[in-house]
Image: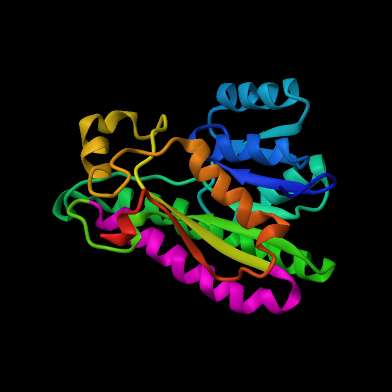
Amino acid sequence: MSDMTGTAALVTGGNSGIGRATAKALAGRGAHVVITGRDADRGERTVKEIRAAGGRADFVAATLLGEASARDLVHRAEELAGPIDVLVNSAGVFPFGPTDTTGEQDFDLVYDTNVKVPYFLVAALAPAMAARGGGAIVNVTTMVAQFGAAGMGLYGSSKAALVLLTKSWAAEYGPRGVRVNAVSPGPTRTEGTAGMGEALDELARGGPAGRPADPEEIAEAIVFLAGEEAGFVHGAVLPVDGGRIAV
């Protein structure tokens, strides 16, 4: 288990679901974690839980939609925790539905949140990480970035873009000490997927595990990629999907 004492981590979407579980796991290893999200109440509750467990955490309320919001978040996070050593791009939106009923507003929201914001967070943070000689970036994608699924084309394609960016960033920043990798979760029980009901279980039954994941199971994979144990891992997309990749 990596000791991350003395490092600072920024986790987007850190006030719920996979992001919250990741923030808690990173803080448990000693990192000073800055989490961001739109819901201030949930964010402050998460910070209190981390601090109560002996960790260091701060919350930054932010609506992330483009370059300006991404760069502003980096500035505010570094004011609280100092230079960021670990970035976890966990925030994402996933409206599902038929292509012919998807409006341009939904299309733009998905790509702004799932692609544009991670792009400009990396643009703001990776050069400084490289100048310091090291850092880790972990992007959260999805198993439906790997195969076609009816009604999931918009979400899946945005995360497929993030898969390609993960590999491109690894090639760009890896030679200067910045490791960039991704985790590809399968169906996971979170606040965001609660509305899926039985559909989540049905989707999970397509894999050998036969069940949805808990957020903590995804978080452990993210923390592994952020830590020293994964020091020789660059540009990887780690499936944490209950074996769906195997069938």
Tell me residue 56's x, y (percent). Answer: 78, 33
Q: Is residue 45 left or right of residue 106?
A: right
Specify the farthest residue to the front. 208
Quadrant of image for the C terminus? bottom left
User: In terms of image quadrants, where is residue 246?
Assistant: bottom left
Q: Is residue 15 left or right of residue 94?
A: right
Q: What range is drawn magenta here?
A: 152-178
Q: Residue 109 colored magenta?
A: no
Tell me residue 234's x, y (percent). Answer: 60, 70
Tell me residue 121's x, y (percent). Answer: 62, 57
67 shown above or below 169: above
Name the residue located 51 percent from the left edge and 32 percent from the top edge. Answer: 16
Residue 192 appears in view: yes
The prevailing secondary structure element of the residues shown in magenta is: helix
Name the residue located 31 percent from the left edge and 54 percent from the top edge. Answer: 244
User: In terms of image quadrants, where is residue 61?
Assistant: top right
User: In terms of image quadrants, where is residue 35?
Assistant: top right
Tell me residue 206's x, y (percent). Answer: 23, 48
Residue 89 appears in view: no
Name the residue located 54 percent from the left edge and 46 percent from the top edge. Answer: 64
Name the residue located 24 percent from the left edge and 50 percent from the top edge. Answer: 103
29 shown above or below 238: above
Front residue (pair 210, 38): 210
Q: Is residue 161 left or right of residue 154?
A: right
Count of marks overlaid on the render: 0
